[in-house]
Amino acid sequence: MTTWVRKLCYPLPSVCSAFCWSLAAAHWVATLMREIISTKDAPQAIGPYSQAIKANGFIFCSGQVAIDPVNQQVIAGDVAAQTDRALRNLSAILEAAGSALSKVVKSTVFLKNMNDFAAMNTVYGKYFSSVPPARSTVEVARLPKDVLVEIDVIATE
């Protein structure tokens, strides 16, 4: 039995034991329902993280940058080219999870320079034209591998 269930259930009368065991079982099942998503069609993780995690009907994708999955190198190009590559990487990960960009409900775009917003937005709009997800866009001081853009998403199955 997990520690939090033990703390909750121990002081309670024995009539609550079935409830406590069902809490423990629910926690155990929820833990098992967490699936790591990985595909060779997107860049391999460059640190201790997963490309994505599927849990409770959602796919949580790690931020993707403009790395070519074939050679694991950052592509040459401006923010438009890098945005395109990042979104293609996200698409491959979502496909491996049984989802798609059309099922994205939230995205976060990290830009090295907010002056690149219009160029990024033009490419982004081509991938999310019909029902765009909720989105946050922020300027950051630096991104992994010194890329110009990083994008993460949350999608439904």
Image (tube, helix red, strand yellow):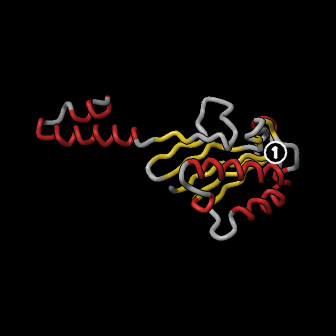
Residue ID at (74%, 43%): 65
Residue hosting label 1: 148
Q: Nearer the viewer, residue 6 or 145?
A: 145
* Amino acid marked by disc 1: Leu
Q: Is residue 15 left or right of residue 120?
A: left
Residue at horizontal 28 percent and vertical 34 percent from the top: 5
Q: Is the residue marked by circle 1 packed among few (<14), some (14-19), or many (20+) residues within 10 Å?
A: many
Secondary structure at badge 1 equals loop
Q: Foreground: 148 or 57?
A: 57
Quadrant of residue 22 within the rendered picture: top left
Where is residue 114 drawn, in percent x and y?
A: 81, 52
How many marks on residues? 1
The quarter of the image holding the N terminus is top left
Image location (x, y in percent) of residue 17: 16, 37
Q: Residue at x 46, y 53 (%)?
A: 57
**Which quarter of the picture shows residue 122?**
bottom right
